[in-house]
């Protein structure tokens, strides 16, 4: 951070005549070479080395330097001192609408960051833009709907009938298993009902535990603060000059640095501390051991009327033209026996498209009948959703 180390001093600036190119001192409002007055096209210039420029000490020149910025006559365009009440060229009075600013500084143009930081920044910006466009295209391409023409290559179908039979069946078990409708219940003697876990004996198990055994003295090295390490910072000064917009500039001595930069100094100290000691102490304990012991109960046999699975019959094929169910699935029964059936059907269609195959199932025979071998169908895919002939389907892996 800079600080002000001196009083303000004033130096004289120069300006170059646009007509004869003569370099004039700031005190002059008229060119000392050709006599033309200073106008808006001619600007005050700072000395090449303001620090070595002579300070203004003359009372008249100091009055000019401290009077304030010049004003420019709007009628003839010549520069006039702030202390002048009227234009020395055309006589127009100050403050009557003729005064215009000495300098109009246009706003700095907005420079794009990729231009300001060079070719590499431009290349990075172009690369990022291309990457964004590529990502947008890939996302759009991934989610856009797609339409394909498909052709049936196979329809794998299977008709299955599960048959249950109601008949007298024989069972064995225990009293709690006998149903109320059981017939011909007969004892079959003692049977193993279940096993119980009973205590058999104890084993002695050896183990050890960690117990305190006092303290020991430990020596260690610690780093502690023991002062500071300081270095002197160099001090640098320079002249800071700014235009007064009247042919003169004010300069101030600005200095930075100086003083000291310090860091904490650490020293090694040898210290001691008490550290607890431990030892392993042997112990024993009694661990129970168990055995599995059978428990007996009276067993029974009985007969009972009940349903049970009897058999499975199937029909299958790869062409919807041959759809049929197994013939003669149920058998005529007598003596109170009877049968019942549960029918299940699966239909899997394979459609070829773009060197790929789409496999999916359909719910019933009527729908499957539309997919004859070689028939054409429309496929539509949108994200993870599929349709065949406008009907949603779930593809099979």
Image (cartoon, grey):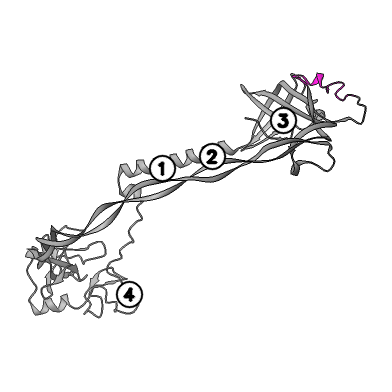
The image quadrant that residue 164 belongs to is top right
User: Which one is earlier in the sequence, the residue at label 4 or at label 3?
Assistant: 4
Specify whether 32 is left or right of 106.
Answer: left
Q: Nearer the viewer, residue 100 or 375?
A: 375
Q: Main secondary structure of the magenta part?
A: loop
Kindly identify which numbered label has been placed on residue 368: none
User: Which one is earlier in the sequence, the residue at label 4 or at label 1?
Assistant: 4
Q: Which residue is mark 3?
A: 361
Q: Which residue is mark 1?
A: 128
Q: Which residue is mark 4?
A: 98
Q: Position of residue 219 (x, y in %)?
A: 12, 58
Q: Position of residue 84 (x, y in %)?
A: 22, 79
Is 322 magenta? The answer is: yes
Q: Vertically, is 48 above or below 102?
A: above
User: Which one is earlier in the sequence, the residue at label 2 or at label 4?
Assistant: 4
Query: In the structure shown, which secondary structural element does the residue marked by tag 3 occupy?
Result: strand
Q: Badge 1 local density, few (<14 within 10 Å), some, or many (20+)? A: few
Mark 2 or 1: in front is: 2
């Amino acid at each position: 951070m800079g600080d002000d180390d001196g009083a303000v001093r004033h130096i004289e600036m120069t300006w170059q005549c646009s007509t004869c190119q003569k370099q004039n001192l700031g005190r002059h409002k008229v060119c000392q070479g050709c006599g033309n007055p200073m106008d808006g096209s001619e600007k005050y210039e700072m000395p090449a080395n303001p620090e070595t420029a002579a300070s203004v000490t003359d009372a008249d020149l100091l009055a000019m330097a401290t009077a304030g910025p010049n004003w420019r006559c709007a009628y003839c365009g010549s520069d006039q001192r702030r202390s002048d009440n009227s234009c020395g060229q055309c006589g127009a009075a100050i403050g009557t609408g003729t005064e215009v600013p000495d300098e109009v500084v246009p706003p700095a143009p907005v420079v794009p960051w990729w231009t300001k930081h060079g070719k590499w920044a431009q290349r990075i910006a172009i690369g990022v833009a291309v990457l964004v466009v590529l990502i947008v295209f890939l996302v759009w391409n991934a989610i856009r709907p797609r339409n394909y023409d498909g052709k049936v290559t196979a329809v794998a179908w299977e008709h299955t009938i599960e048959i249950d039979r109601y008949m007298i069946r024989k069972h064995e078990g225990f009293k709690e298993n006998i149903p109320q409708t059981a017939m011909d219940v007969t004892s079959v003697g003692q049977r193993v009902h279940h096993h119980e876990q009973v205590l058999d004996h104890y084993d002695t198990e050896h183990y050890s535990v960690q117990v305190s055994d006092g303290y020991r003295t430990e020596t260690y090295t610690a780093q502690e603060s023991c002062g500071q390490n300081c270095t002197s910072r160099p001090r640098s000064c320079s002249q800071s000059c700014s235009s007064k917009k009247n042919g003169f500039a004010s300069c101030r001595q600005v200095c930075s640095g100086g003083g000291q930069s310090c860091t904490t100094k650490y020293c090694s100290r040898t210290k001691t501390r008490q550290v607890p000691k431990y030892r392993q102490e042997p112990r024993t304990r009694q661990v129970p051991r168990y055995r599995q012991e059978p428990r007996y109960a009276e067993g029974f046999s009985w007969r009972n009327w009940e349903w049970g699975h009897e058999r499975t019959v199937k029909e299958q094929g790869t062409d919807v033209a041959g759809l049929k169910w197994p013939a003669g699935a149920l058998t005529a029964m007598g003596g109170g026996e009877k049968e019942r059936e549960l029918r299940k059907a699966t239909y899997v269609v394979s459609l070829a498209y773009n060197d790929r195959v789409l496999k999916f199932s359909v719910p019933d025979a009527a729908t499957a009948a539309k997919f004859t071998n070689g028939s054409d169908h429309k496929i539509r895919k949108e994200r993870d959703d599929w349709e065949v002939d406008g009907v949603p389907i779930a593809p099979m892996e």
